[in-house]
Image (cartoon, rainbow, N blue to C red):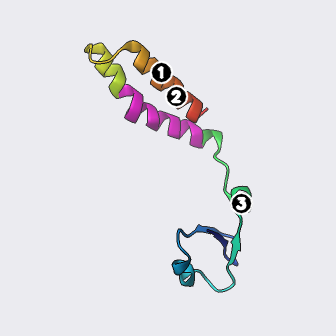
Amino acid sequence: MHYKTPDNSLHFLDSAEYEHFLPAGSIQITDAEAETMRPKPSALDYSVMRKAAFVAESDPIFFMSQRGEATQQEWLDKVAEIKARWP
C-alpha cells in the first residue's frame, strides 16, 4: 500500500499493521498515483547506475571470457542487457 504524508512524501507499507507509524493525516493512494509522485531518474543517475552495473555484472564475464571460462557473446549479451536497463 502506498501512502502520501501531509508533506507530500511517498511511503510504501507492505502491511496495514504498520499504518500507525505514518504521520497523522497520511492518506492511502493508488499505485498509479504513487508512480506519478516518484522522482524520475536523470541522465546522470542513469550513467552512474549503468557504470555500476558494468563493474558488478559485465566486467566479471569479460574477464572470464578472456580466460576461456565464458564466451564473448555472453559478455556482449550482458552489456546489451545493462544498456537496455540503464539507457
Residue at 56%, 77% (x, y): give it: 16
Q: Position of residue 68 (x, y in %)?
A: 27, 13
Report crowding for label 1: few under 14, some 14 to 19, many 20 or more residues within 10 A (C-alpha).
Answer: few
Tell me if residue 22 comes above or below residue 82 in the rendering.
below
Foreground disc of the pair 2, 3: 2
Q: Are marks 1 and 2 in contact (CB under 8 Å)?
A: yes
Towards the viewer: 33 or 42: 33
Q: Is residue 46 magenta?
A: yes
Residue type beneath disc 2: Glu
Q: Position of residue 46 (x, y in %)?
A: 58, 39
Q: CA distance from mark 2 to mark 3?
A: 27 Å
Q: Position of residue 45 (x, y in %)?
A: 58, 43
Q: Are marks 3 and 1 in contact (CB under 8 Å)?
A: no
**Residue 7 visible to the viewer:** no
- The numbered mark, 3 or 1, whose residue comes first in the sequence reads 3
Quadrant in the rendering for residue 37 = bottom right
Q: Position of residue 58 (x, y in %)?
A: 41, 27
Q: Is residue 71 magenta?
A: no
Q: Which residue is mark 3?
A: 37
Rendered image: mark on residue 81: 2
Which span is picked out in magenta?
A: 45-59
Q: Main secondary structure of the magenta part?
A: helix
Tell me if residue 59 comes above or below residue 11 in the rendering.
above
- The numbered mark, 2 or 3, whose residue comes first in the sequence reads 3
Residue at 53%, 68% (x, y): give it: 14
Q: Are marks 2 and 3 in contact (CB under 8 Å)?
A: no
The answer to whether 32 appears left or right of 49 in the picture is right
Q: Secondary structure at mark 1?
A: helix
Identify the image quadrant of the N terminus: bottom right
Identify the image quadrant of the C terminus: top right
Rendered image: mark on residue 77: 1
